[in-house]
Image: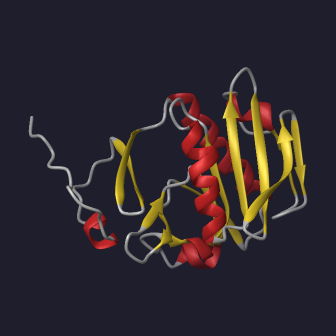
Amino acid sequence: MTAMTWPDHLLSLDEFERLPEDDSRRYELQEGVLHVTPKAASLHQRVVKRLASLLDQQLDERWEAMLDVEVVLTASYPPTLRVPDVVVASTDLIDQNPNRLHAQDVVLAVEVISPGSSRMDRVYKLFEYAKAGIPFYWVVELGDSVSVTAMRLGGETYDVVFDGGGEMILEQPFPLTLDLPSLARRGPAP
């Protein structure tokens, strides 16, 4: 087994891009600092996949939900690059097949809380996504049931527009109705 040599300095986007390919973990940059986290567990993956599918069913053809896309929040040194669980961006942009998106390309970013990610998703990413100008941010909590805190950018911070479980009905960023408990169940999406 060969040990990976880890950087001993803040990384640029070019240096981040040159890291060895490794699909066994998730890699992000926070102000040039490399953050490595384990891949998500099975239920997390199911919820993410079903959420993206349900979003795509209700979005018009101008928008598309994507999984695990790199999003550059700050390109200048030291950069911040995140990989939200789900993003919604324009279909025209996705058709151009970019290697990564930039914050201004993303209408909605979604993070599903995993063990060990609560502070990162609820505090750091909340601040970073707002500062980068991403208009909508959802945090999905897996517990006894699925709940969502849906937020809309108001100035420099997010305002909560929905916080709960059951059925989530929103008019922005798109008219949506989501049966949140169904996200964790196996089977066809409702």
Asked if residue 77 is positioned above or below residue 189 in the image, the reply reads below
Question: Where, quadrant-wise, is the N terminus in this rendering?
Answer: top left
Q: How is the image coloured?
A: secondary structure
Q: Residue at x 36, y 63 (%)?
A: 32
On the image, the x and y values in percent for residue 100 come to: 45, 69
- Quarter occupied by residue 144: top right
Question: Where, quadrant-wise, is the C terminus in this rendering?
Answer: top right
User: Which residue is situated farthest in the top direction here?
Assistant: 144
Nearest to the observer: residue 188 or residue 149? 149
Q: Residue at x 42, y 38 (%)?
A: 39
- Quarter occupied by residue 146: top right
Q: Residue at x 58, y 29 (%)?
A: 43
All told, the count of numbered labels is 0
Nearest to the observer: residue 178 or residue 2? 2
On the image, the x and y values in percent for residue 28 come to: 41, 55
- Quarter occupied by residue 89: bottom right
Asked if residue 38 is positioned above or below residue 95 in the image, the reply reads above
On the image, the x and y values in percent for residue 80 come to: 45, 64
Left of 152 or right of it: where is 75? left
Left of 92 or right of it: where is 101? left
Left of 72 or right of it: where is 78? left
On the image, the x and y values in percent for residue 121 come to: 59, 45
Q: Residue at x 42, y 78 (%)?
A: 76
Left of 150 or right of it: where is 185? left
Nearest to the observer: residue 27 or residue 53? 27
